[in-house]
Amino acid sequence: MRKPETPPQRSTPKRQQTSPNSTNSNSSRRGKPSSGSGARPAVQQGAGQWYAGAAARPRNKQTFKQEAYQNLERKLDAKVESEERRRKARELHAQQQAAEFPDSAKPETIRLNRAISQAGVCGRREADEMIKNGLVQVNGAVVKEMGTKVKPDRDIIKVNGKRIQSQQLVYLLLNKPKNHVTTLNDPEGRHTVMDTIKGATEERVFPVGRLDRNTTGLLIITNDGDMTKKLTHPSFQVKKVYHVKLDRPVSLEDLDALRKGIMLDDGPARADKADYVDAGGADEVGIEIHSGRNRIVRRMFEHLGFTVKSLDRVGFAHLSKKGLPRGNWRFLTDQEVAFLKMLGNPKTPVRAGAKPERTAQRKPLPRPAGRPGR
C-alpha cells in the first residue's frame, strides 16, 4: 500500500535582528518609540514640533509684541473688574449691616455747603453766602454758622424756603467742537459746551477743567465734585494727551527742550512725553502733560517761537475719543467711572516755582504689529 505524501514543511524565516537605534524597526513603523538608549521618538503628524518631546518653537518678534499688548489689556480689565467687585461687595456688606443692625447704620455727615452744592443748587462759595445771609434752614431752624455738619439722608434742608434733594451722579464725555466756550453761560452770547449736551440730563452738571475756545477734544462733564477735584488738582497728576499742529516743522532739539522743561512767566513747565505724530509730518506733534495751568501747551510752544494752528485733546486719563465724532457726547461706562475713582492716591505736591525733578523714563511698550517704526 502506498503511503500518502506529506506536504513539505514551510521553513519559517528567522526574525530580522535589528539594532535598538535602527529607524526601520517595526516599532518605529507603528509610531511607537523604540526601547533603548538614545532612541528618538517618531514624528507625530500635526504635533507642531520638530519631533515628539522637543521644545516648542521659539516665538518670533511679532508674536511677542502682540502678547505684550494682550497681557497689558488683560491686566487693565482685571484691575477695573476687581475694583468693581470690591465696590459691590462693600455696598452689599453695608446693606447687610443696615438690615441686621438698623441703629448702627449711620448716614454720612458732611458740611452744609457741600450738601447744598451736591443738590445742584449752586457752588460751595455761593452756598456759604446763602448761609451767612440766613437763607438756609436745617430741620426748621435757620443756620448761619459756617462749617455746620448735616446728614443729607435724614435732615430736612431748605434753601429760600424750598427743600433740596440730593441728585444722581452723572458722567458725560464730550468731544468739544471749535468756537465753544467752556462755561455754564456766556454773557457775550457765544456758544458754550452746555449747548452741545442740552437735554442729556436733568441734573445740574458742570465741565471738569477748561479748554480754550479754539481748542477741541475731550472734556468730562459731571456733577461729582469729588471726582472733579481729583481730575483737576495738580497733586493727582492726571495725564492729558494733545495733538498739536504748528506753523513750521519741529526739530529734535525742540522736542528735547519740551521734555527737559522750559521756564515760563509763571514757573517751569515740562512735557512728560513729546514726539512726532505717526501719520503726520514734522509740523505735527503729540505731547503728554499732567499740568492743568491756563493755556500751558500753547504757551510752551509760543516760548519756543512757534504758532499753534490747531490744538486737540485726544486723551484724558485713560479715556480716548475713539468712536466719538467732533461735537458729540456719550455717557461714561461703569468701568470707566470706576477707573477714574481709582485715581485717589495723590502724588507729592510740588512747590510753586520749584525745579521739576528728572524722573527715570520707562521704556516704551513695543509697537503693535503693522505700525511703521521710527
Image (cartoon, rainbow, N blue to C red):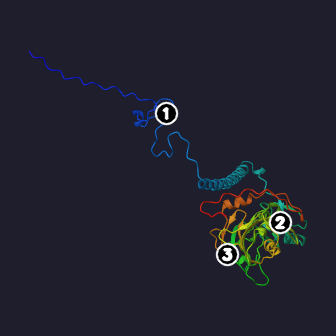
Instruction: Using residue 34 as the reference point, say whether residue 153 is left or right of it.
Output: right
Instruction: Using residue 299 as the reference point, say whether residue 94 is left or right of it.
Output: left
CA gap between label 3 and label 1 equals: 78 Å
**Observer-nearest residue: 137 or 215?**
215
In which quadrant of the rendered image does the C terminus lie? bottom right
- Around disc 3, counting alpha carbons within 10 Å, would you say few (fewer than 14), some (14 to 19), or many (20 or more)? few
CA gap between label 2 and label 3 equals: 43 Å
- Identity of the residue furthest to the bottom in this view: 188
Residue 199 is marked as: 3
Observer-side mark, 2 or 3, equals 2
**Marked residue nearer the N-terminal end (3 or 1):** 1
Going 75% across and 83% down the picture, which residue do you hit? 190
Residue type, mark 2 in image: Gly
**Observer-nearest residue: 122 or 267?**
267
**Marked residue nearer the N-terminal end (2 or 1):** 1
Going 55% across and 45% down the picture, which residue do you hit? 56
Per the image, label 2 sits on a secondary structure element best described as loop
Residue at which label 2 appears: 261
The quadrant in which residue 22 appears is: top left
Going 78% across and 70% down the picture, which residue do you hit? 254
Observer-side mark, 3 or 1, equals 1
